[in-house]
Image (cartoon, coloured by chain):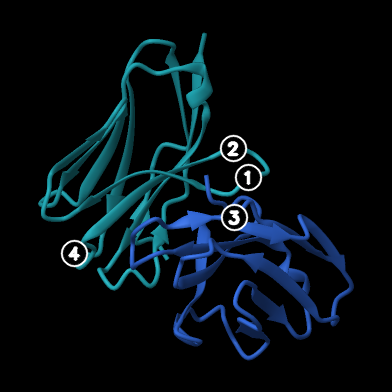
Amino acid sequence: EPEVTQTPSHQVTQMGQEVILRCVPISNHLYFYWYRQILGQKVEFLVSFYNNEISEKSEIFDDQFSVERPDGSNFTLKIRSTKLEDSAMYFCASSADRGKGYTFGSGTRLTVV
Amino acid sequence: DQQVKQNSPSLSVQEGRISILNCDYTNSMFDYFLWYKKYPAEGPTFLISISSIKDKNEDGRFTVFLNKSAKHLSLHIVPSQPGDSAVYFCAASEGNFNKFYFGSGTKLNVKP
């Protein structure tokens, strides 16, 4: 069964450092998303991406965050200057069409120290 | 953000019995709903969906019911199996499907 692959599974970084979280969506999917889940809290939407541009973003997704699809297969989330409160599980998702086949990756646990 | 609520943080059910997981929402513009389950250290796994034009959708042991007037949906698992033990999230979208709002999850424990 096709999977969304995320690397690394766990990333530890110092506060103020830049991190890039990587995702390989399912190959024929066209819509890409990032969500995060802070420990003990809900899964929260960050951003959706289609046709090489952001479709929608939440208030969490401020200027410190950016997304990119640098080639035909990867979808990355960059946090420019990490803060302690950025520590969370970050989930990438992709879908073939809006709402259809919405598939999540297994997540990257980001720990900011 | 309390647009989607799962008021039961946990549920314990005997193997073979029915599990009923509940979800309430406040935004009447939501018209597409998903249920996911999540095992520790894994991403959410899609289970079943329902659009607001239906009030029931069934897939094997999983049935989702939608009561639009009450802004309530439920997931029924019959019969429950120990492998169903996981955290179950409901999620809702306003129809552009760009983003889903998640509930806080219900941890289901199916006892053998």
Residue B54 percent coordinates (x, y): 12, 48
- Nearest the viewer among B71 and B100 is B100
- Front: mark 3 or 1: 3
When asked about the image quadrant of residue A79, the answer is bottom right
Answer with the quarter of the image where residue B100 lies.
bottom left
Residue denoted by label 4? B28
Q: Mark 1 = which residue?
A: B42
Place residue B2 in its image quadrant.
bottom left
The span from disc 4 to disc 1 (Cα, nearest Å) is 31 Å
Q: Colour of chain B?
A: cyan
Choose mark 2 or mark 4, whichever is in front. 2
Q: Which residue is mark 3?
A: A105
When the figure is inspected, residue A74 is found, relative to residue B70, above or below; the finding is: below
Tell me whether the residue at label 3 lies in contact with that at label 1, contact meaning CB atoms closer than 8 angstroms: no
Does residue B41 lie above or below A36 as drawn? Answer: above
Tag 2: amino acid: Tyr
Query: Marks 3 and 2, Cα distance to the nearest angstrom?
Result: 12 Å
**Nearest to N terminus: mark 4 or mark 1:** 4
Give residue B79's position: percent from left, percent from top: 34, 16
Colour of the chain lettered A: blue
Mark 1 crowdedness (10 Å alpha carbons): few <14, some 14-19, many ≥20: some
Q: Which mark is residue B68?
A: none
Question: Which residue is located at x 31 percent, y 25 percent?
Answer: B61
Please give the residue where the numbered disc 2 appears in the rendered image. B39
Q: Nearer the viewer, mark 3 or mark 2?
A: 3
Q: Are marks 4 and 1 in contact (CB under 8 Å)?
A: no
Against A64, residue B111 (above or below) is: above
